[in-house]
Amino acid sequence: MNLQRYFLFLLVIPFLFACDEQDSWEKQPDAVRGIVFHLTEEPFDGETLQTTKSTGEFSRVEHLIVTEDGEAVPNIKSTYLPDSRKIFAEGLQVGDYKLLVLAVMGDETQDQATVHPISSIHDTWLTFPENLQRPLEAEYFYAQIPFSVSLNSNGQEESSLSEVSLKRIIGKISFDFSYNNDYVRTAVTELTMDASNTRFYTSFSANQEYSGQSDGSLQIQSLLEKKELLFMPVVGQESTGTIEMSKLHHTDQESKQQYSFRIHIQPNRNEQVNTVLSCDDDQDGTVFATARAYEESEHYSILSDSESKEVYYDASQRSFRINQPLQVRIDENAMLHTRFYSVRPVKGMTIYARISQYSSEWLKFAYYEEIPMLGDALLPIPFMSRDVIYYTESGKRVKIPRQETFTNSQIEFKLVSDDPYWKMIEQIKVNWYLSFASYGGDPDAPDGQPAGNWRGVRPVHIREYIAYFTNVAYMWELPECEQTMHDYVAANGEFHDDANRPVPVSTIMTKFRSMSSFKLGLIKPGAVAGLGGIGVYGLAQYILNYHYSNTYYCSLAFHELGHCMGYGHSSSFTYGPWAESVMNHFYVNNIHRFPIDSWEYLRSRENPNLYNP
């Protein structure tokens, strides 16, 4: 029994030693005797490695060493180590051979590719399904390189080949598009390639022969994001394909246009397809500000939390009239400049222009799919670079030649939009001028550096002021607002001034509209909640945060408007019913009807830039 166990132990020892030896041979490449081949990939023909974008490292490498007649060399060991990109071979005798390598970058399973085992240079090594209906996801490389083995002075094997350069067995199509009108480019909604009936090889053998062919059922490919496509070479000399462009127009129409191109895909070549996408809109002079055009423009959000106090306290940079929140001008570089003092966006804004030098009619000068809240943007004007055609409101064509210079003095604007929000803005008749002031405070200080009753107003407060004044100005144009004051008078008697003289509702309406400007600041918490006078207006932070829903806080806001109309504390317009029971309740009860109908547009209560308290 003991003898049997000893005999079995002896049988197991060689097997364990063989496994250990193999593991050691594969894990110690630099210490192994034999031949070493280092793999590198070549760029696409005519390119450099820096310009050729590949999918990364080799994910799979297969290789075979064959004799001169193409059959696998027997009784040798070889392996590929991915960390060093090296093939190690041991056991080769002096003589002439060929190294065959097939490498993959990417996941060949996404291409339904099959890598076949081979034992001869005549075997099929790689195949794709005939009904693969899309470009390849992975890249496939190949090398067939002859080499010889000799013995050096130390009696060790030495190869004539050390660096193995792999080329792609596939090709690439790179699409490049140019436009005669850049506003056409940014209006494109889809670009597709159709290469139906194009046949691609589906099989590749170890001796670099292509065979088989796809069935011609290639899916239409989007080129909007991905403009480089990988394919096996085309069967025959070349094939043809079409590119279809779908684009928007500022008249809300969508159109399609087709362009033809030739396909000639060869191994390791980047086939460039350069297409000028000319169309009927090439001469259109309208600034067509699609979402993409706006995003690509020089744009930003004004009155953001990060904006400098030197900017928002400077009335030349940050001020506006409440009934003209969208400012349009030609800047010093002849760019179209829009700035929007609104805490809601507006969709579908048309800017008409009258350029008397060329037409007495209004021209469709610009169209914005959307102007974002507090958006500030500069967009190029087409006639500064080429001759253009505009259409008037009546449908006439007006040609304007390329301009060398252009200024605000040569143009006037009008704004048209069907956006329901903009329709409310258009109803505002008062033209109060709003600007912003520190009144001695410092918004960069943690507490606003109070100066008397004031502290530094910050953008978070200014945005709420815009919301509040937009609502109040709109509210004043509602017939129900005036009627509410008449109803109060009918039930309770006239409103009165500080001398207890009656003030008719018509006088209130006129006085309210005749206020010309407000320099807005922020009141520190303490003895007063607000301050108001001719051209001066300030509220505490908590009022600005809750003017939408709190009738008491809202009465404080109207109290200060009473002062701005010229009334004191003995009148009905401050501590009296106008502010404390009529206007404040009308504002809160009708907030759902106002342009800024919810605190959630700004969510200022949650803003970390508020003062505490």
Image (cartoon, grey):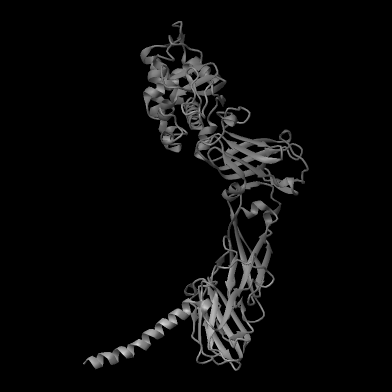
Q: Looking at the picture, does residue 13 appear above or below residue 480?
A: below
Front in this rendered view, residue 19 or 429: 19
- What is the x, y in percent for residue 547? 41, 28
Q: Quadrant of the C terminus?
A: top left
User: Is 113 left or right of 258, judged from the image as shown?
Assistant: left
The image quarter in which residue 483 lies: top left
Q: Residue furthest left?
A: 1
Q: Residue furthest front?
A: 154
- What is the x, y in percent for residue 539? 46, 23
Q: Residue at x 68, y 43 (%)?
A: 392
Q: Residue furthest top?
A: 499
Q: Looking at the picture, does residue 318 appear above or below residue 149?
A: above
Front in this rendered view, residue 74 or 402: 74
The image quarter in which residue 310 lies: top right
User: Is 94 left or right of 540, judged from the image as shown?
Assistant: right
User: Is 212 left or right of 576, judged from the image as shown?
Assistant: right
Q: Residue at x 55, y 28 (%)?
A: 322
- What is the x, y in percent for residue 376? 59, 39
Q: Looking at the picture, does residue 403 appear above or below residue 162?
A: above
- Residue 517 in sight from this viewpoint: yes
Could you tell me how many numbered marks the image carries?
0
Front in this rendered view, residue 321 or 436: 436
